[in-house]
Image: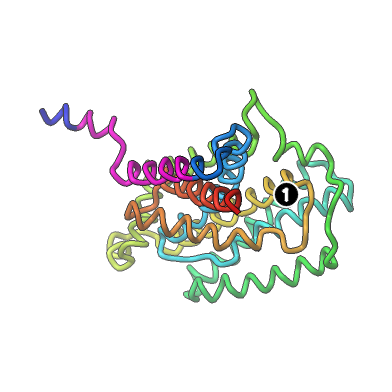
Amino acid sequence: MNANNTALKKIIPAKETLVLVGILISMVLFFQIFTSTFIDKANLLDILKEASKLCVISFGMAIIIAAGGIDLSLGHIAGFSAIVATTILKEYNAGVVVGLVCGLSIGLIFGLFNGFLVAYLGISSFIVTLGTQFIILGLRYWITSGNIIMFLPDTYTIIGNGKIFSIHNTIIIMIGLAIICYYQMERTVFGRRVSSIGGNITASWLSCINIRKHTMLTFVIGAIFAAVTGIVHTSHMEVVSVDIGDGFLLDALIIAVFSIVVYGRMKTLGVILVSVILIALTNGLTMMG
């Protein structure tokens, strides 16, 4: 009997998942009634592509929050990473691989910077990442002089606009990172230790968990995910403005916090569902005027 119950639990989705799916279905039906074009293939594809970009940075935010921190600079890191990547491509005629490596390195550098100050110097993550925002703000104006970067090479724009087996690259990238996030946070010792630190830091210390190392790693992972989001977003838009990425912060916070509140812990599927719900809500309200 117990074996049957265990098998059923593996098959039937968690009640939290069913609630979020129910909310999403209700929204789709509501907007379809009032717009009549909400479930058009093109519109649904746009929702999935936008949600995919938000998912990636929200994964990073959720990991940081799961460890008891917060990163207010993720949106700026996303934008600055894209600015560096495209500037390398345009101004120095470097290959796309070099540009991407430089862009992702920006995420790594600021992740290490934020993580070191928070984990090893004990400064509040709110204060540290708020300060990082202003550092990046100055750097991006220094690099771009406030100008828009346009006419990006096809080797870069294909990242956000290309397809593999008729599936858009943005969705493929999100799925790939979702699998990595799921495995690391829900199937490994690292994920359990991160959740333990966020749940009870004293108990984690008594359990001999290296709190500083794990806290720092969450900021590094979050910043790299943000850098990926910035690159994917700008390659899709095919233009880079100086304030690119600023709007990601609030959305990522809402998605990460809401999904953690619903599930009581960091849940990859929860981040995906909440991202789709948020984008679908925005899209539907826009269509309704």
Classify residue 267 as left or right of residue 57: left
Residue occupying image coordinates x 56% and y 67%? 72
The magenta-colored residue range is 6-30
Relative vertical location of residue 33 with respect to residue 203 in this rendering, above or below: above
Q: Could you tell me residue 180's position as x and y percent?
A: 49, 40
Residue 273 image-quadrant placement: top left
Classify residue 151 as left or right of residue 262: right
Residue occupying image coordinates x 45% and y 66%? 69
Q: Does the magenta-highlighted stretch encompass residue 8?
A: yes
Q: Which quadrant would the N terminus be assigned to in this image?
A: top left
Q: Does the magenta-highlighted stretch encompass residue 70?
A: no
Q: Could you tell me residue 240's position as x and y percent?
A: 78, 54
Q: Which quadrant would the C terminus be assigned to in this image?
A: bottom right
142 or 115: nearer the viewer: 142
Q: Could you tell me residue 128's position as x and y percent?
A: 56, 73
Classify residue 57 as left or right of residue 243: left
Residue occupying image coordinates x 41% and y 43%? 26
Q: Could you tell me residue 140's position as x and y percent?
A: 76, 65
- Tag 1: amino acid: Thr
Relative vertical location of residue 217 with respect to residue 34 in this rendering, above or below: below
190 or 138: nearer the viewer: 138
The residue that label 1 is drawn on is 234
177 or 160: nearer the viewer: 160
Secondary structure under tag 1 reads helix
Callout count = 1
The crowding category of the residue bearing disc 1, from other C-alpha atoms within 10 Å (few below 14, some 14 to 19, many at least 20), is many
